[in-house]
Image (cartoon, grey):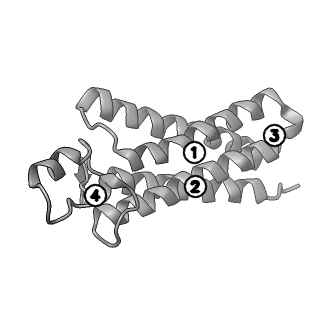
Amino acid sequence: MMRKGEFHAQRLALAIPALLLAGAYVSQYGFGLYPCEMCWWQRWPHFAALVFAIAAYAMPPQRRPLVGLAAVAILVSGLIGVFHAGVEYDWWEGITACALAPTTGGDALEAILAQPTISCDIPAWTLMGISLAGFNAIFSIGGAITIFALLRKKTRR
């Protein structure tokens, strides 16, 4: 029999990446907020989390480890979100070409044309000063911590 904490953890492990990915695609195709390279980096762990969460439903004997792996993937996406938000807020430099400013010297037009269309260091949208990468970090890290806590929760008899 599944414990109550496991029950809720399994549902969160499916809901969190599904809702965050749905939000990403609605913002992309519904509102024209196209992802930069680091935005894609945040999506890949959510895709993995969905696979683990769905597998947890398909393989009940392996439920706990699969839900735990989904939580790890969600946490990874949140940590990438922290890094991306830091690049957007100029706390540190990014490690991709899309987050670097054009170099000075050389042909200015060539430098501009060589830059990616979607820049990683400029938030596409913010709410109360929090970018989409920041919201991903908040929801993903908070969700992963909640899933881990629910998996550790002991049942009362």
Cα distance between the residues tagged 3 and 4 = 39 Å
The residue that label 3 is drawn on is 63
**Above or below, comparing residue 2 to residue 111 in the picture:** above
Q: Which mark is residue 45?
A: 1
- Which residue is at 83% across, 30% downward? 59
Neighbourhood count class around disc 2 (C-alpha, 10 Å): few under 14, some 14–19, many 20 upward: many
The residue that label 2 is drawn on is 76
Q: Considering only order in the chain, which callout, 4 or 1, is on the residue closer to the N terminus?
A: 1
Q: Is residue 41 left or right of residue 60?
A: left
Cα distance between the residues tagged 2 and 4 = 20 Å
| Disc nearest the viewer among 1 and 3 | 1
Cα distance between the residues tagged 1 and 4 = 21 Å
Q: Considering only order in the chain, which callout, 2 or 3, is on the residue closer to the N terminus?
A: 3
Q: Secondary structure at mark 2?
A: helix
Name the residue at the front extreme.
106
Q: Which mark is residue 150?
A: none
- Which residue is at 61% across, 54% downward? 144
